[in-house]
Image (spheres, rainbow, N blue to C red):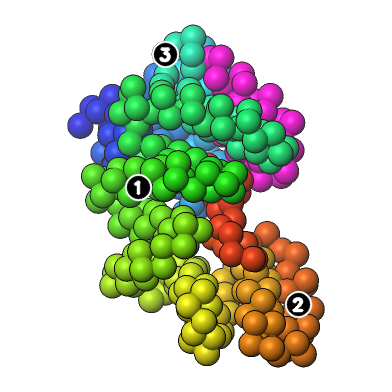
Amino acid sequence: MTLEEIEQQHFTRVPISELITDIERIYEISQPDTDIRARASYLMGVYYEQRDREKAEHYYANAQRMATKLKNKRLLSDMLHYEATEAFRSGDLREVNRLEQKALALATEVGHPHRICFSYYMLGTVALNYGIQESGIDYLNQALHVSKDSGLLKLQIRLFSTLAELHLTSQNPLKSRNYAKEAIRVARELSMDIEILDSTIRLATVELELKKYGEVTKLIAEVRKTLPKENHSLWCVTHTLMGKVHEAKRRYDKAEAEFRMALSLADYVNAERVRSNVHVHLAELYLKMKKPREALARIARGSCGCGKGAGYLRPQGGAALHARVLQGAWRI
């Protein structure tokens, strides 16, 4: 494949792990300080981002140097985005906003739809972190429009999922359901297994909010058929959802068993908030079971969950904003 073909595949539908052999080949045969070497170096950085930070930083630094020397505005917009993600990790949202605005301006000038789309997504994320939901949704809708026009299917999954959760927390479950179903449709089109599972669980949270308990049970059974045993975070969510179904059906013993199983699986990194939420779910259940002492104990334990954990459910029956809206991996 040519570099242009690789970029098109990477931006639209193919995981970079499936393209790395061709990227490495092009990197090795390209001349130093050329446009092709610079773009290949950036893609090498993307590949190593989640695998070897030292190598990733090496390739990003080379891409930055060459992009600056060549005055390649397209690649410079990509490098601004890289800087923005580093600022996001450090919690500097003002800097994220500044860098993504600059990236968006450059990407718009040269017609780089992937970066335009992702910069809109990041700007929406910043707005949501500041609690400016209307602005956040507007940015996300602009990103969705660009992704549809340019066939950026991988980004569409993320955008549909994010919008599904935002509309659910905004008390618009029917619109949320539509977005959740769209995320599943695109994930299936791309045969992205983990995204299919994740999006299906998200749809189940919407159905729970709509009190469609049969649909929740059906969706969870579907997910559990193929959900890897080692994926404790999603297994934890399936048990929490089924706990809420049993609770709604007054099957309190079964609900308790599901919540306890969810707690046992909340043993992964940054699961503190998840454990806190499950403790509160248990407290609510014990109140219904007329066990106030057990409820108080769970409330006390739930109040300790101050970490940055993920959670599909917030206490008292609603569905929480998924953590990848505000904290997820921002690199594609």
- Please report the residue visible at 34 percent of the width from the left and 27 percent of the height from the top: 148
Which residue extends farthest top? 109
Residue 267 colored magenta?
Answer: no
Q: Which mark is residue 111?
A: 3
How many numbered marks, from 0 up?
A: 3
Residue 91 colored magenta?
Answer: yes
* Residues at marks 2 and 3, CA–CA distance in whole angstroms: 53 Å
Q: Is residue 97 left or right of residue 265?
A: right
Marks 2 & 3, CB-CB < 8 Å contact: no
The residue tagged 1 is: 181
Q: Which residues are magenta?
A: 78-106
CA neighbours of label 2 inside 10 A, class few (<14), some (14 to 19), many (20+): some
Mark 2: amino acid: Ile
Mark toward the start of the polypeptide (1 vs 2): 1
Task: Measuring from the top left, give residue 34's x and y in whole percent.
Answer: 40, 19
The kind of secondary structure the magenta stretch mainly shows is helix
Which quadrant of the figure contains the N terminus? top left
Q: From the viewer's perspective, is the residue at label 1 or at label 3 nearer? A: 1
Mark toward the start of the polypeptide (2 vs 3): 3
Mark 3: amino acid: Gly
Secondary structure of the residue carrying numbered label 1: helix
Mark toward the start of the polypeptide (1 vs 3): 3
Task: Measuring from the top left, give residue 48's x and y in whole percent.
Answer: 45, 47
